[in-house]
Image: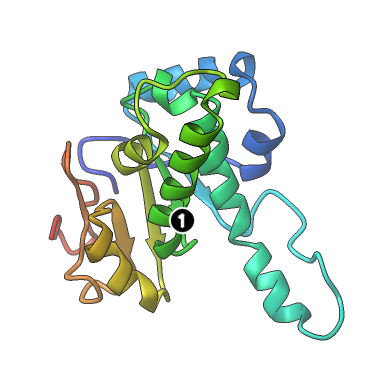
Amino acid sequence: MLTGSLPPISVSPSAIIRSCSPSWHSPFSAAAERAGVVLGFHIGTGGDTVVFRGPGGAVINYMETTYPGMRVVSHLVASGALDRHPDLRILIAEGGAAWVSAIGDRMDEAYRQHGMFVRPELSRLPSEIICQQVYASFQHDKSAVQVVPATGYRNVLSARRAELGVLYFCRRTGPLLQHADGASGP
């Protein structure tokens, strides 16, 4: 349960990816921001989870379930949705965490290198928006145990509490989750 907030609202990643126009998500994002509700995107939902049949299909299809979470972050940051709603938080559930800093770096590069084409202009770098508003949770992501502390990305939730020490924490707002056992924070 989220401390001082309602439980996350589950949103289909495909709804965001297909319709990232401000006319669709601005009223929804504004309402969620006002209510203090975290928008949760669980990987493997909102689309076809079987994209390949044949040799390697099980592993390929498992990998494909993680990409919509990355696309949601890319779309909500690049479209300016999160920048326009700085108190809105999103959670990519069970999609790993090691990728978050890498996608922030890549988006910063695109923002700098293609700035003349970027619309809308953002008030912060994409990586700053991600670090402040995007949360990621994982169950099995041993690379996150190394990457997360090294990059300073702290909005990470691990199903295995001892894994990261664990970083159930947001720099701006303090503890993000309160656990069933009553524990919160690192």
Q: Position of residue 8 (x, y in %)?
A: 41, 41
Residue at point 56%, 42% (across, down): 72
Residue at point 62%, 35% (across, down): 16
Numbered label tally: 1
Taking 173 as reference, is 23 left or right?
right
185 in relation to 18, above or below: below
Taking 154 as reference, is 108 left or right?
right
Taking 35 as reference, is 50 left or right?
right
Q: Position of residue 143 (x, y in %)?
A: 38, 75
In which quadrant is the C terminus drawn?
bottom left
Relative to the observer, which residue lies in front, 65 or 130? 130
Farthest right residue? 54
Amino acid at circle 1 = Ala
Q: How is the image coloured?
A: rainbow
Q: Position of residue 101 (x, y in %)?
A: 38, 54
6 in relation to 182, above or below: above
Residue at point 17%, 43% (across, down): 171
Which residue is the site of mark 1? 93
Q: Secondary structure at mark 1?
A: strand
Q: Position of residue 138 (x, y in %)?
A: 41, 66
Categorize mark 1 by other alpha carbons within 10 Å: few (<14), some (14-19), many (20+).
Answer: many
Based on the displayed image, in which of its 4 quarters is residue 65 positioned?
bottom right
Residue at point 63%, 59% (across, down): 44
Relative to the observer, which residue lies in front, 7 or 100? 100
Q: Is residue 106 visible?
A: yes
33 in relation to 172, above or below: above
Based on the displayed image, in which of its 4 quarters is residue 75 positioned?
top right
Q: Is residue 10 visible?
A: no
Relative to the observer, which residue lies in front, 14 or 67? 67
6 in relation to 146, above or below: above
